Image (spheres, rainbow, N blue to C red):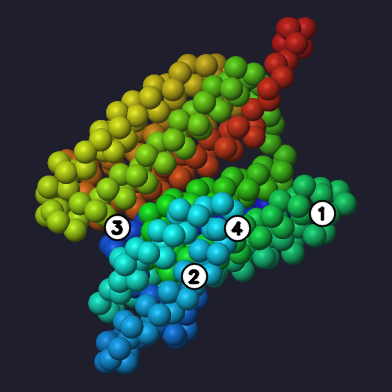
Amino acid sequence: MRSFRRLTISTLIAVYVLILVGGVVRSTGSGMGCPDWPKCFGQWVPPTSVESLPDNYKEIYAAHREKKNQRFAKYLHLIGMDETADKILKDPTVLQEADFNPTKTMIEYLNRLTGVIIGFLILAVFISSIRFRRTEPRLTTVSLLSFLLVCFQGWIGSFVVSTNLTPWTITVHMFLALLLVAMLFYLVHRASYATMIDSSTGFWWLLACMGVLLVQVLLGTQVREALDEVATYAVREQWIANLGDAFILHRSFSWIVLLLHVGLILKLRKTDGAKAFLLTLIVLILGTILTGVSMAWFAVPPYLQPVHLLLASLTFGLQFMLLLKLNRKEKPVAALS
């Protein structure tokens, strides 16, 4: 069990590295550094100069993406998302090709390479869990679901590229990553022999904290979408001023996130086993807010965006781990005396 736990923790760390790298991809505008998927410009090792590409490479890969989008639209029609499917097919910006940029291509390639490594790690986690299928069947089940999820995540990632980084696909991609984080934390928890923390009210308070954090992440993706649009017509120093209501709501909602977590600390401050979690949690929350404020003050420096995303993701992971450790059933008074 110890080796399984170590492997799962290593995989979890790798997922957080991927979230950080994904943030770098987003902040540097490298998402279309490779216009096709899973290869990059039709190669397993990406080109380093535009001279190695055909003169009409933009038309070639736009045509490839158009075919993939037609398949994607069919899937969307099947689940009733007709309007979204039609928008993808009719929006001319979806097929716009970016100029070749070797730096952005390499950043996106490293992002994909990290994703492949994680895929193999999660496959190893599943294979390792098979020996526990009788004694701990949940480990095997969740490990299998994690592997299927990472495969689905890769499939969704291909459509993120083919639709030219359509905002809602990026949001789905992000929340699937958080779901994968939750699954891996669950595996770590099940493979550990840690004591539980007794607090019924703390459990529900923590659920509320997780809910508002996820809402805040969703609001953050909307701010990111607004930034993408503002960046097309304004200089970086004017981005924040042109964001409008999306940024104001995201900024204001951070107070709700902070206050709820302060309430959680007050609820659990005297609970045995919770102090280390709470201290780390408040540090992560304050770090997330501080990086957000710094981005607003210093014209959204690219290096802060992935850090901001990573801190929010770490906060969610720690929340989920604490949720798993909290026991909703309070000890009876007799047991406490």
Is 128 left, or right, of 72 in this rendering? right
State the CA–CA distance, disc 1 to disc 4.
Answer: 38 Å
The label nearer to you, 3 versus 2, is 2
Looking at numbered disc 4 in the image, what kind of residue is underneath it?
Leu
Q: Is residue 18 above or below residue 281?
A: below
The label nearer to you, 4 versus 3, is 4
Q: Earlier in the sequence, mark 4 or mark 2?
A: 2
Asked whether the beta carbons under mark 4 and mark 2 sit within 8 Å of each other, the answer is: no
Taking the spot 71% from the left edge, 47% from the top edge, the residue there is 191
Looking at numbered disc 1 in the image, what kind of residue is underneath it?
Phe
Residue occupied by mark 1: 132
Depth order, front residue of 330/80: 80
Which secondary structure, mark 3?
helix
Looking at numbered disc 2 in the image, what kind of residue is underneath it?
Gln
State the CA–CA distance, disc 1 to disc 2.
Answer: 43 Å
Residue occupied by mark 4: 78
The location of residue 234, given as percent across then percent down, is 13, 53
Q: Is residue 74 above or below residue 319?
A: below
The label nearer to you, 3 versus 1, is 3
